Amino acid sequence: MEYLYQAGKPNGKKFILLHGTGGDETSLIELAKFLDADSTIMSFRGMIEEEGMNRFFKRNGLNQFDFESLEKETNHLLEEIKEISAEKAIALEDWILVGYSNGANIAAHMLLERETALTKGIFFHPMSLEVHTQSFNLSDKRIWVSYGGAKDPIVSDDSFAELVAAFRDRSGEVTVVETNYGHQLTMDEVQSAREWLKG
């Protein structure tokens, strides 16, 4: 799996970056450095190609997900994270997942559906993938999520609410930020995520 690794300062945050559809391992670097200039970064490129665009799992049209691909790619990504973390001598619980759109979706799915030592996430414009097969407690999970409001053509109110409920119903700690700018990232929400990291 293609990835980019940049070591930061010892006291910096440690980010796993997962891009949106059409992005790559460089797409969220600038955002990560805004969140924490001293951060260590491990940034992945999605292995699925859709009309020339990188993704982390297949779909059969807008919001029509290929669940077999989702599970396969989630397992693969988690194994890659474990292997590289061991190689770099970084504990899984030290990482913060940072994802946008498709990358946020697979990251949230990983925390909900895999028992893992990964505990923290910043998810820009995620949605529910409507997979709820697990019931283990999520009280060790702490996530920040943003939503583009009624102007978001991809993430519906119901889908976003379902995702938030999936975490909260299993005792996960969720901070929600809503914008009015649709599916695009805004400086206000990135600033909010940076402040959340200080908590």
Image (cartoon, grey):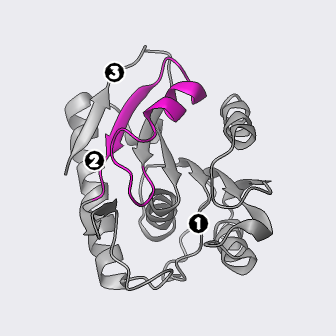
Q: Which residues are magenta?
A: 19-46
Any magenta on residue 45?
A: yes
The verdict on residue 129 being magenta is: no
**Residue at x 26% of width, y 73% of height:** 72
Q: Nearer the viewer, residue 86 or 53?
A: 53
Q: Secondary structure at mark 2?
A: helix
Q: Nearer the viewer, residue 117 or 130?
A: 130
Residue 40 position, x and y percent, is 40, 26
On residue 7, the disc is 3
Residue designated by label 1: 137
Q: What amino acid is labelled 3 in the image? A: Ala
- The amino acid pointed to by label 2 is Lys
Alpha carbon separation for disc pair 2 and 3 = 17 Å
Secondary structure beneath dot 1 equals loop
**Label of residue 82 in the image:** 2
Q: Is residue 122 above or below residue 133?
A: above
Percent x, y for residue 126?
Answer: 59, 63
The location of residue 137, given as percent across then percent down, is: 58, 66
Task: Kindly identify the amino acid type of the residue bearing the numbered disc 1.
Answer: Asn
Distance between the alpha carbons at the discs numbered 2 and 1: 21 Å
* Residue at (75, 75) in percent of width and height: 157
